[in-house]
Amino acid sequence: MSSVSAPRPTSTPVVLPVSKAVLWLVGTAFVALAAYYFIGVDQGAVSVFGKDMHIHEFVHDARHFLGFPCH
């Protein structure tokens, strides 16, 4: 008995132009820095929203879980 193996499909790499890669990198960095600011930095005195504490309270538990002190 002989066994015949089916040809395996070859994978083709994704070609991403440099301009799109730069856009993805800048967008990802912006989202990461915004998340870092809202979770780790935004609290009361240095808030860009003034005395409004809604964002601080919204991410309060995540702040403590990630090790950021806030009070």
Image (cartoon, grey):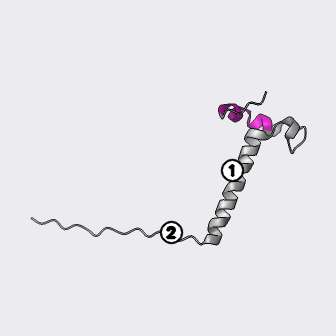
Query: Tag 1: residue type?
Result: Ala
> Residue visible at 74% across and 30% down?
69
Residue 57 lies in quadrant = top right
Query: In this picture, is 63 found above or below 30?
Result: above
Binning the other alpha carbons within 10 Å of mark 1 as few (below 14), some (14 to 19) or many (20 upward) gives few
Main SS of residues in magenta: helix
Query: How would you rate the neighbour count of disc 2 (Cα within 10 Å): few for under 14, some for 14-19, many for 20 or more?
Result: few
Give the percent coordinates (x, y) of residue 56.
79, 36
Is 60 a magenta residue?
yes
- Residue 13 on image: x %, y %: 47, 69
Q: Report the Cα–Cα distance between label 2 and label 1.
A: 24 Å
Indicate which disc, 2 or 1, sits on the residue closer to the N terminus. 2
Q: Which residues are magenta?
A: 56-65
Q: Is residue 50 above or below residue 15?
A: above
User: Do tag 2 and tag 1 residues touch (Cβ < 8 Å)?
Assistant: no
- 6 or 29: nearer the eye? 29
Q: Quadrant of residue 42?
A: top right
State the residue lying farthest toward the right. Answer: 50
- What label sits on residue 14 in the rendered view? 2
The type of residue carrying mark 2 is Val
Q: Residue furthest top?
A: 71
Q: Which quadrant is home to the C terminus?
A: top right
Which residue is disc 1 drawn over?
32
Q: What residue lies at 9% left-to-right and 64% top-to-bottom?
A: 1
Q: Position of residue 16 (x, y in %)?
A: 57, 70
Image side of residue 37 versus residue 12, left or right: right
Question: Magenta stretch: residue 17 in it?
Answer: no
Say which quarter of the image contains residue 38. top right
Q: What kind of element bears circle 2? A: loop
Q: Could you tell me which secondary element the residue under label 1 belongs to?
A: helix
